[in-house]
Image: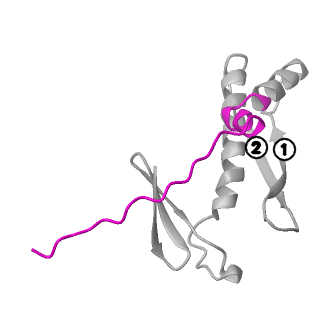
Amino acid sequence: MEVRHTDGDRSEIRIGHHVLVADQPLEAGGSDAGPTPTDMFVASLAACAEFYIQRFLRRHLDSLDGLTVRASAQMSGERPARVTRVDIAIQLPHGTPPELRNGALRAADRCLVRESLRHAPQIELVVLAERVTSGT
């Protein structure tokens, strides 16, 4: 993955052959060309939960129509700023038998992103040496 500054608060994110844009909202000085990195963080949790739920339900249902996962986040009011809570609401497909509900919740609970937050990874920051180009 690679993230490059493009303009203002906007960045281009390359993940394999996919290109995403991150930005800040207008009221924060950005151009609102894409979601904020924090929104992407929360969205990755919701997308991961949805993926694990769909994998579980696909073994039991003919259709996943209506499966929807919504997420919202609360931020700290103090420094350092951080996400303090994420709420995830799961809408199961219409007609999902009640006995599958707990299995869907367990599947969401075990998604890789959530597990990574439970057992925080070590994150190492490194500043790379400046590239030097010769004038010859």
* Three-letter amino acid code of the residue under disc 2: Val
Main SS, magenta residues: loop
The picture quadrant where one finds residue 54 is top right
Q: Is residue 102 above or below residue 82?
A: above
What amino acid is found at the position of numbered circle 1 in the picture?
Ala
Of callouts 1 and 2, the N-terminal one: 2
In reply to whether residue 18 is colored magenta, the answer given is: no
Residue 102 vertical position relative to residue 129 in the rendered view, above or below? above
- Over which residues does the magenta segment extend? 109-136
Mark 2 secondary-structure assignment:
strand
Q: Residue at x 69, y 59 (%)?
A: 39
Q: Nearer the viewer, residue 31 or 55?
A: 31
Question: Is-magenta flag for residue 121?
Answer: yes
- The image shows residue 79 at horizontal and vertical percentages of 82, 68
Left or right: residue 98 compared with residue 59 = right
| Residue at x 63%, y 73% (from the top left corner) | 24
Q: Position of residue 78 (x, y in %)?
A: 87, 68
Figure quadrant of the C terminus? bottom left
| Residue at the image position 26 percent from the left and 68 percent from the top | 132
Give the crowd class for mark 2: few <14, some 14-19, many >=20 residues within 10 Å.
some
Residue 66 visible from this viewpoint: no
Label 1 to label 2, Cα distance in Å?
6 Å
Q: Which residue is mark 2?
A: 69
> Can you identify the residue that label 1 sits on?
89
Q: Is residue 49 left or right of residue 75?
A: left
**88 displayed left or right of 26:** right
Residue in the image at 63% along x and 64% along y? 35
Residue 117 place in picture, x, y as percent: 74, 40
- Picture coordinates of residue 90, whole percent (x, y): 82, 39
Please say if the residues under marks 1 and 2 sit with CB atoms less than 8 Å apart: yes
